[in-house]
Amino acid sequence: MNLFKKKKELHKETDAPILEVRDLHFTYNDEKHALNGVDLKIYEGEKIAVLGSNGAGKSTFFLNINGVLKPHEGEIFYRGEKITKKRLNHLRKNVGIVFQDADNQIIASTVMAEVSFGPMNLKLPREEVLRRVDKALDYMNITEFRDRPPHYLSGGEKKRVSIADIIAMESEVIIFDEPTAALDPLNAQMLEEVLHKMGQEGRTILLSTHDVDFAYRWAERVIVFCQGKVIADDTPLRVFKQEEILKKANLKHPVLFDVYDILREKGIVPDGDLYPKNVQEFETMMKSL
C-alpha cells in the first residue's frame, strides 16, 4: 500500500490535523488575489513539498499560516484551536519559518545573540534560553561560530544560523521558503541532510521549491499551487504523473522519472509504477534486472 495513502487513512480515523486552513483568502492592495479559497489539513510528522510557479501563492500561504500576514477571509486552526488575534502569538511560536534569504532573517550582532533572540522573546528563564541555544548550535554544527558576526559568514553558514533560529524556538511546524535557493551544491546537500534528519525525528516540515528532483526524492506529499488555489495534493508519484497539472503549474518531470519512462519504453524495465526516487534506488533497480 502507498505509504502516504496509508498515513492519510490513519489520520482520518484517529488523528486531528496539527494545522488546518479553511477557505483562506488573501489580497494584496485590493487587487492581486494571492490566495483564493485554500483548504488544507497538515498532519504531524508530514514532509510536504509545496510547488508552483512564481506568484502562485506559496509564500503568501506560508506567511498566513505563520501569522505574519492576516487572512482577509477564512480560518486557521492549530491543534484544533481557532487562531484569533489573542492566539496569534501561539501560532507564531509553534509555526516557524526559515526565509529564502537568510540576510532578511538575521538581525543580531553575533550568532549567539541571533539564535537566543527568539527564546528570549518568549521570556524563558536564562538557563532554558542557553540550553536551547546550545542545542540548536550543536544540531546545526555551528557551535564554533557562536561569537562570530553572522553577516560575515558564508551563504551556507548563514542558512545554518537561520535554521538554528527556528530550532531554538522549538517550533512544532517548520516552514522552509525556497531553502536551496542561492546555495552551492555542497551546501544544498548539507541542507537536504538536515531536512532528512528532521524528518526522521518526526518534525512536521513544509517547504517550497522549484527543484522538482529534490521535491520528488524528499517529500512524501506534494501540494501544487496555481493562481492562489491548490490544484493538486497527493503523493509525489501521483502528482508528477498528471500531465495537465504539470502544464498548468509550469512544472516538469523529475529527471529520474523521465529516465524510467525511457527505459520502460525500450523494454529494459518492466511496466508499473516502480519509479526510483534517487540515484541509490535507481542503482538498486538496475542491479536487480
Image (spheres, rainbow, N blue to C red):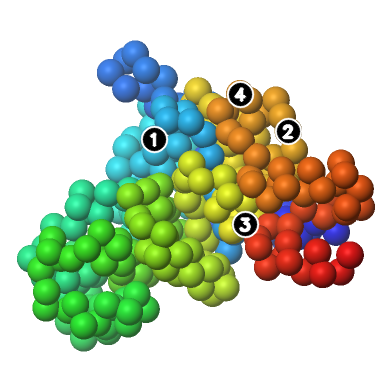
**Quadrant in the picture for the N terminus:** bottom right
Q: CA distance from mark 4 to mark 2?
A: 10 Å
Quickly name the residue at label 4: 248
Q: Earlier in the sequence, mark 4 or mark 3?
A: 3
- Report how far apart the C-alphas of labels 4 and 3 lie in the structure: 22 Å
- Is residue 79 visible in the rendered image? The answer is no
Q: Amino acid at mark 1?
A: Thr
Q: Quadrant of the C terminus?
A: bottom right
**Number of residues whose C-alpha sits closer than 10 Å to that of mark 3, classed few (under 14), some (14–19) or many (20 or more):** some
What is the CA distance from the residue labelled 1 to the residue labelled 2?
25 Å
Q: Residue at x 41, y 43 (%)?
A: 62
- Image position of 211 with respect to 274: above or below: above
Residue labelled with disc 2: 242
4 and 2 marks in contact (CB < 8 Å): no
Sequence-wise first label, 1 or 3: 1
- The residue that mark 1 highlights is 60
Say which residue appears at 16% left-offset and 75% top-offset.
Answer: 112
Q: Quadrant of residue 85?
A: top left
The earlier-in-sequence mark between 1 and 4 is: 1
**Pick the front one: 58 or 189:** 189
| Residue 150 drawn above or below residue 255 | below
> Along the line of sight, which residue is nearer the eye, 281 or 248?
281
Residues marked 1 and 4 touching at CB (< 8 Å): no
- Relative horizontal placement of residue 52, taking residue 288 as reference (left or right): left
Mark toward the start of the polypeptide (4 vs 2): 2
- Gap between marks 1 and 3, in whole Å? 25 Å
The answer for how far apart the CA atoms under marks 1 and 4 are is: 19 Å
**Left or right: 117 as drawn, with respect to 44:** left
Residue farthest left in this picture: 109
User: In the picture provided, is 170 more to the left or to the right than 76?
Assistant: left
Q: Is residue 184 visible?
A: yes
